[in-house]
Image: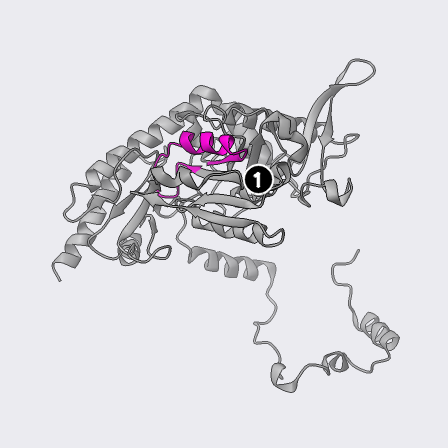
Amino acid sequence: MSYIPQGEEERARMLAALGLESVEELYAVLPEEARLGRPLRLPGPLSELELERELGGLAARNADASKAVCFLGAGAYDRWVPAVVDAIVGRGEFLTAYTPYQPEVSQGTLQSIFEYQSMICGLTGLEVANASLYDGASALGEALLMAANVTGRERFLLPSTLHPFYRDVAEAYARGPRLRLETLPEEGGRIAAGAVSQVDETVAAVVVQQPNFLGLIEDPRPLVEAAHAGGALAVLVVDPVSLGLLASPGELGADIAVGEGQPLGSHLNFGGPYLGFLAARERYVRRMPGRIAGQTRDVDGRVGYVLTLQAREQHIRRERATSNVCTNEALVALAASVYLATLGTRGLGEVARQSALKARYLAAELGRLPGVRLAFDGPFFDEFVVELPQEAEAVSEAMLDRGFLAGLPLGRFRPGWERRLLVAVTEKRSREELDGYVRALGEVLAAWASR
């Protein structure tokens, strides 16, 4: 197939078939005031070398984690990716945006999906996992549809401490089937203790993010118990690296666990492609979205891999389907599998431990700066919110001039939070980088104070 299918001859044949003299006649129905009336102002064609220089120049205008020391987080993290991960996912038999899942030609891909599912089950403490979804936020949306399917209910409770972007995606998922999303109140940056009173027999699922958007560690157990007492499901949104230290969703009683798998062996990629994981109790396996790969044996007793379940509209009756999701992020899921296999349980625990310890060190050192304090009390994992004496947006820009991506200013998410900055610390940050961050922030704030 040609990628430039429309030459003059082809265009003339199409117009003749339509009974038209020119392409302009195709647009005659558009109001004159809505038409541009001139050619687009585009530069002329470039050679491959010129184009490479042009795009390289545009890319160089970005301040990414290779040029600045990164303390940005909020769902996407600058973590160390072992070289073996890129080496394996770059192999020709794996390197494709598509998922080659036909069993007669793709036993290796099916095995890699099966291994990924097994590792996600081990990580979350739940019995079944699917082949992956687009990202963490869409995995939450699919979990809500799954809970509605299981319970036959339409009312959901989501905390105000949930990542705002996850909330946005959940609302988009809820719009079509008319699910009702209500908000659990917070107190001191965590879900308020009295929130359990909102759980009753009309609720389909209660959602808890652990750690929450503000980096704080929640105690989901009272809400999980209340959900089960009312016949609802408990959905936990988790940071997979935090599970190297914290109790797993399975240990906390969750029915479904979802999250973003980017921290498991994927680089920061300007928004994607990322990886949504979803795991659940075995009794809900037929309600899970997407694909599930399984292991079996052929008539000669040889191990083989198959697509065991894919309860989507393309394969079963619409009223019994779970979702129209069909494309998983197989290559990113493979990266997560290689990462987890390389580090092992002890390695992931060490990544989590270093992240948590370095975050505590930085939080303590920042707290020594005049006018800087932690915005919330209580335990956190590897992210925390600091209250600054100046607006966080302006401080963040000044820090970038000193070579630091300082964190996420929170003023865009809630009025009154203009001086709050969400700071993430991963295992990659060295002592010199942490101390350099503190010195740079001290200089920025001192310069403002002297004005």
The residue drawn where x is 57% and y is 35% is 278
Is residue 228 inside the magenta stretch?
yes
User: Toward which corner of the image does residue 424 lie, by quadrant?
Assistant: top left
Amino acid under disc 1: Ala
The residue drawn where x is 83% and y is 16% is 299
Give x and y (percent) for residue 400.
31, 53
Identify the residue at the far left of this view.
Answer: 450
Relative vertical location of residue 65 with respect to residue 4 in this rendering, above or below: above
Q: Considering depth in this image, is 87 or 215 the residue closer to the camera? A: 215
Identify the residue at the far front of this view.
Answer: 201
Q: Which residue is mark 1?
A: 143
User: Toward which corner of the image does residue 223 lie, by quadrant?
Assistant: top left
Q: How many marks?
A: 1
Q: Considering depth in this image, is 168 or 283 the residue closer to the camera? A: 283
Q: Is residue 71 left or right of residue 83?
A: left
User: Toward which corner of the image does residue 365 lie, by quadrant?
Assistant: top left
Q: Is residue 395 left or right of residue 85?
A: left
Give x and y (percent) for residue 257.
52, 33
Relative vertical location of residue 308 with respect to residue 162 in this rendering, above or below: above
Give x and y (percent) for residue 337.
56, 29
Which quadrant is home to the C terminus? bottom left
Magenta-tinted stretch: 209-237
Mark 1: secondary structure: helix
The residue drawn where x is 33% and y is 31% is 356
Which quadrant is home to the N terminus? bottom right
Q: Considering depth in this image, is 74 or 365 the residue closer to the camera? A: 74
Is residue 385 inside the magenta stretch?
no
Identify the residue at the far top of this view.
Answer: 301
